[in-house]
Image: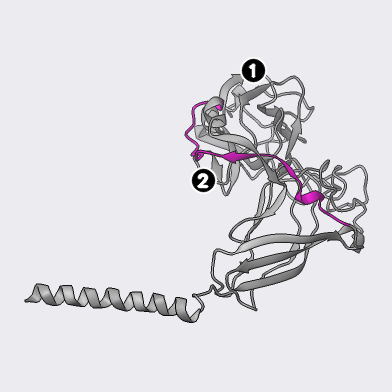
Amino acid sequence: MLKNKIVYRLSYIIAFCSCLTACNSLYDLPSDKDFISDNLTYSTKILEPTLGRTTVFSILNADNSTLPMRFEIVNPRFGDGRAADDFLKTASTYEWITEYDGEEKSLEEIEAKRHLVEKPMFEVDSNGRFILWASATNDRILPRPSDTTLKTQDIRFFDLKLSNSGGIQYVKDFQFIPWREIDYSPETDVNIYTGGVAPDPNSPKDPRKRAYILPTSMGNLVGEQTNVDLVNNNDKKDLVVYIRKFEGGNGHNLRLKFLDKDSIPIDPANFNETRWDQLLHAFNRVTTSEYVQYDVAYPVPLTSRSSFYTVGGNAKVDISYSRKGWGGVRTTGFFGLQFKIFKAGDWEVVFHFRNDNPKFDDE
């Protein structure tokens, strides 16, 4: 008896659904539509990325609009009305086909996980995020003027068309104002407008002075001549860093180098507590009396994923050494840098002791 009731009820439900379908067809009733809000907006419409770096802007406020939606950049133009589609053209950029995890054992293993694809240098994805790819370089997209004066005709404007089955909305007058390429970070030693050397922030009009990259960490470094702690402050910069290219490498080398106050290389062997094989996700270490060199895949780090070799999205190097201080107590001096390098090539990270050399001898 119970079985017959269940069969009857199922038959009734099926018949009811069939009736609804037939009624919709007979009376041409509208199907359910997506919702697209009149108040859909972006938290900012001024985009100021640095060229040469992959940058993602996640700024959409969909206001409960039905996702996914279709996004399309339309009407790209300069402020004076000229067409401005240069930043939307395609160029080759890397795309990961297998997830990078920081455990790869060779450059070949890393390269097997990614390949070059043609993508618009600037695009909007299916979630409404704007993406500037690292393929957008100075030679492909003209950056903002170097004289610090920004005129309307220097600004690229565009509108964004958003649509789903519920309708179409436009968000108008986005501004795309890119900074010129700077190949590394931190870039405190670079004038972001011209790409030249940045002036000393304390004496910006003194051409004899300049700004520097400073170590991220530094401590227990005693001066060889002064026998006092080396310091970095507003008045004195005892240890500074240069990130620069060098010639004669294989195209994917990264060197760590140390200079004394006379700009003579310090033998890396002096930094006797440094774990050289655990500093970077790098391979084929070569150590000489002047530098430590690795083979790396660029950019450094390869992704924003956290790994043993990164902190806060940056690569990190921690250099240290120990010696006996007063009373026979062993003390450890240390310094380090958190950094990124965006452009492939042969690069060196140079730590320069400008005013006094670190003391390595025991007391």
Per the rendering, the mark at residue 288 is 1
Image x and y of residue 234, in percent: 77, 52
Q: Work out whether mark 1 precedes mark 2 in sequence or the reverse, and give the earlier one.
A: 1
Left/right placement of residue 264 relative to residue 279 reads right
Image x and y of residue 358, in percent: 67, 32
Residue type, mark 2 in image: Ser
Nearest the viewer among 286 and 73 is: 73
Image x and y of residue 151, in percent: 92, 61
Question: Under tag 1, what secondary structure?
Answer: loop
Alpha-carbon distance for marks 1 and 2?
31 Å
Q: At 71% from the left edge and 45% from the top edge, which residue is drawn?
A: 186
Question: Under tag 2, what secondary structure?
Answer: loop
Does 10 appear above or below 319? below
Image x and y of residue 72, in percent: 69, 60
Return the residue at label 2: 306
Q: Residue furthest left?
A: 1
The image shows a total of numbered marks equal to 2
- What span is colored magenta in the figure? 83-107
Q: Is residue 220 visible?
A: no
